[in-house]
Image (tube, rainbow, N blue to C red):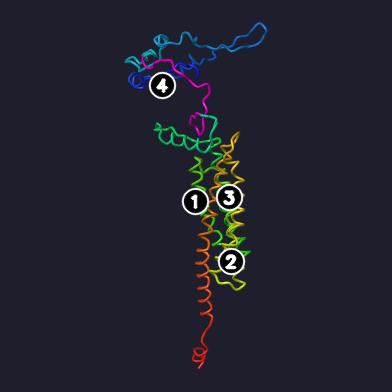
Amino acid sequence: MPTAIKLEVRRDAAASLGVDLNKVGSTLSQLLAGDVVSTWEAPDGENYDVLLQVPRAERSNALLDIITVAGRADANGAASMVPLSTVTRLSPGLSPRQIDRVDLLRQVTVTGNIAGRDAGSAFADISKITASLKLPAGVSLAEEGERRDMEESLGYALQALAMGVIFIYMILAAQFRSFTMPLAIMVALPLAFVGVFVALWLSGSTLNMFSVIGIIMLMGLCAKNGILLVDFINQSRREGMARTEAIIAAGQVRLRPIMMTSLAMIFGMLPMAVGSGEGVETRAPMAFAIIGGMVSSTVLTLLVLPVVYSYLDGVRQFLRRRLAAGSQQPAGEDGARKD
């Protein structure tokens, strides 16, 4: 910031002497900022403005002893002349080259580049620092630039995640022709979040836009395991097998393809998770989210999904019996009412 002269007006002294602050400001503006007092015609015929201004070398407190402003009028009605040094004070200081304003408020922009780490963790540390600051009255902090763009992108990614869950349920409900069967399959989705958060915590990553993209990819991958189990269970029951026996057979038969597809995805993400080079801080959170989610959803789905399927199937059969019992009405009671 360039050096400047700081001018301080002593309002209490000006009020006691009857000095108008507007006159003080206009006088100093004419002398320091300059004022056009006349024009000069050069020999070439061009007219130039004559600017009256105090030279920089003469701008000191001694100058304020010479310049006077009108104060309170005396008994004769004549205004008493008060030196500017009585109501003002000059001191060296610093001044910005340019003053930016937003909504009539001064704005100071602080920028920086991020290198060697992901943007999410850097922004988290910045938020901790700014939260501990005690700002004076009238001063506020606003986050712009890449931080704001990432927050908007994260919001859009979360909306896409919610829409993905809704579309998965609609497709499964249409394929299985049931409203309860997709719930058993989609139980793998919340189970995947356990591995996602554990993997991000162990790797030191954060839940940012890239890890959310990995979670969106997990939605279809995790539902795939549940589809394999539920479809085999339904097929076995249509062939005459009991529910418990069909669940056990599905676990035995479908275990191998589930493990093969899950391990293929996990090992396919390992190079992205442990790799190095340009942009690894953005790729690694997505890879760790996918790996952790696949591990937890694969293991927990094989244990939790059969239990959820059994409960939902029991509730569905109970509702069917109640509806069937309600639709059947005794003929004797009908005849008694007719008589």
Numbered disc 1: secondary structure: helix
Amino acid at dot 4:
Leu
Alpha carbons under labels 1 and 4: distance apart: 68 Å
Q: Residue at x 53, y 70 (%)?
A: 316
Discs 2, 1 touching: Cβ within 8 Å = no
Tell me the number on the disc at residue 216: 3
Identify which residue, 255 or 317, lies in the foreground: 255
Tell me if residue 45 can be seen: yes
From this view, report whether residue 71 is shown above or below residue 233.
above
Q: Residue at the far top: name it.
A: 43
* Residue 93 is a magenta residue: yes
- Looking at marks 1 and 3 on the same chain, the residue that comes earlier in the sequence is marked by 1
Give x and y (percent) for residue 318: 50, 73
Amino acid at dot 3:
Ile
User: Which span of residues is magenta-colored?
Assistant: 86-108
Amino acid at dot 2:
Ile
Q: Which residue is mark 4?
A: 21
Numbered disc 4: secondary structure: helix
Alpha carbons under labels 1 and 3: distance apart: 15 Å
- Looking at marks 2 and 3 on the same chain, the residue that comes earlier in the sequence is marked by 3
